[in-house]
Image (tube, grey):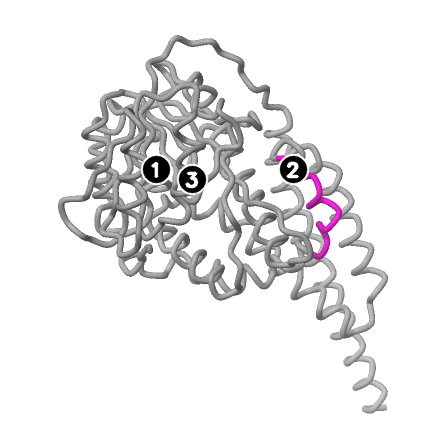
């Protein structure tokens, strides 16, 4: 009799455990799916504003360090922009041929100005601050040496979105596509979903970041916010922490016009990608509490989804697990397609299931350490 009761108790506890695991999986998948549906829908329903403002020409600023090859390739594309008052490039104590390349371009251009930071220090905040201070335009358009404007309309499209109430414009910096590379596929996917997040958050009037590859703001706004003064102790974060510091000083616009995109090369090695993301995430500890909570929702529930699924698969509940994930992927592929299409990365949708699963490892490696990682050690080269 004891043996019978022992078996009954075992099956009872196992049933309760499996039931709890199934409920946890359903809830976690529901929350993580709802999170992305909200962001996808916000971006889908956004109508790009077409303005013909008579704004002053912007000063385009690039901070370059050991970027001779990138500058040789991309500076002609920046210099031929339809709307540009001047191009200021700061040579941040480069050890390659950067200075020589810049001088060659300067000899044939009347709008290119070369600067050198007064002090060699980690990060590029000092270089950018001094360049912005010397700019002759009130409109500052930032990009990087490795960025390639997709058209000569880039600066004018970004610049037209500025007005008295909107002195910050967030643009998109996608990665070039390379076939037969899972690293390239995942890096482009992660870049897209990050952009969907910061664009949608900005549309919800809670901006938390932008990318220095494609961002425009007014010099007056920069001075009003004391520039990078509030986060000078952080080597990185000249883009996202700046957005945080000025979010109460102006409204933010986003730019989804494909002709305003600036492309850059994706990392070519997993180690390079790891170092890049580690540097970028070093600023997460400086985010506001509300943004830390909101940005943790999907990573937390996505990890719970995978772990509970593994438990159920071990217990042979294959059909249930595949059904839940199948519904999730179908819903997100349908709702996500227009957003990925607007960002010119439609091809990523067909790989959504595998990329979504790969995101589990990405979160395990980066996210839980992001908000506790010291931001003082971030460097750039």
> Which badge, 3 or 1, comes first in the chain's sequence?
3
Q: Quadrant of the N terminus?
A: bottom right
Residue 249 appears in the picture as rendered: no
Q: Which residue is mark 3?
A: 211
Measure how far apart labels 3 and 1 are at the Cα level.
12 Å
Q: Magenta segment range?
A: 344-354
The answer to if 278 sits in the magenta stretch is no
Quick check: 26 left or right of 214? right
Compare marks 3 and 2 and give the one earlier in the sequence. 3
Q: Secondary structure at mark 2?
A: helix
Q: Nearer the viewer, residue 142 or 151?
A: 151
Residue at image coords 31%, 28% = 109
Q: Residues within 10 Å of mark 1 (few under 14, many from 20)?
A: some
Q: Is residue 136 left or right of residue 301?
A: left
Residue 219 appears in the figure: yes
Q: Is residue 348 magenta?
A: yes
Give the foreground label among 3 and 1.
3
Position of residue 304 measured from the top left corner of the image (x, y, whole percent): 62, 60
Q: Gap between marks 3 and 2, in whole Å?
A: 18 Å
Identify the residue position indicated by label 1 in the image: 244
Residue at the location (63% across, 35% down)?
A: 344
- Residue underneath mark 2: 340
Q: Secondary structure at mark 3?
A: loop
Point out residue 104 in the picture as x, y percentages from the top left corner.
30, 39
Q: Are marks 3 and 1 in contact (CB under 8 Å)?
A: no
Of the numbered discs in the image, which one, if any, rests on residue 337?
none
**SS assignment at label 1:** helix
């Amino acid at each position: 009799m004891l043996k019978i009761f022992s078996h009954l108790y075992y099956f009872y506890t196992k049933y309760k455990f499996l039931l709890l695991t199934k409920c946890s999986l359903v809830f976690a998948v529901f929350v993580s799916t709802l999170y992305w549906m909200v962001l996808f829908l916000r971006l889908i329903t956004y109508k790009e504003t077409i303005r013909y403002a008579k704004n002053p020409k912007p000063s385009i600023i690039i901070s370059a360090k050991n970027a001779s090859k990138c500058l040789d390739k991309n500076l002609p594309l920046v210099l031929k922009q339809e709307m540009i008052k001047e191009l200021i490039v700061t040579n941040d104590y480069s050890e390659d041929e950067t200075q020589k390349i810049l001088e060659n371009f300067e000899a044939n251009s009347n709008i290119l100005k070369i600067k050198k930071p007064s002090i060699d220090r980690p990060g590029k905040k000092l270089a950018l601050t001094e360049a912005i201070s010397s700019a002759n335009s009130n409109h500052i358009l930032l990009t990087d040496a490795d960025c390639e404007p997709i058209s000569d309309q880039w600066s004018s499209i970004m610049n037209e979105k500025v007005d008295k109430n909107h002195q910050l414009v967030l643009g998109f910096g996608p990665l070039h596509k390379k076939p037969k590379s899972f690293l390239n596929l995942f890096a482009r996917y992660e870049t897209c979903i990050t952009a969907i997040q910061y664009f949608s958050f900005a549309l919800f009037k809670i901006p938390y970041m932008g990318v220095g590859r494609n961002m425009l703001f007014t010099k007056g706004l920069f001075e009003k916010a004391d520039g990078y003064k509030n986060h000078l102790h952080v080597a990185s974060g000249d883009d996202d922490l700046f957005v945080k510091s000025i979010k109460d000083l102006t409204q933010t616009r986003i730019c989804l016009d494909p002709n305003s995109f600036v492309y850059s090369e994706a990392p070519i090695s997993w180690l390079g990608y790891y170092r890049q993301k580690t540097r970028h995430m070093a600023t997460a500890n400086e985010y506001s509490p509300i943004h830390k909570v909101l940005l943790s929702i999907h990573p937390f529930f996505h990890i719970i989804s995978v772990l509970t699924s593994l438990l159920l698969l071990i217990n042979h509940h294959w059909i249930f697990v595949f059904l839940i994930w199948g519904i999730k992927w179908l819903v997100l592929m349908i709702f996500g397609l227009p957003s990925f299409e607007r960002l010119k990365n439609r091809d990523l949708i067909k790989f959504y299931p595998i990329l979504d699963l790969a995101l589990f490892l990405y979160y395990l490696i980066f996210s839980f350490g992001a908000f506790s990682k010291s931001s003082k050690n971030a460097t750039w080269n």
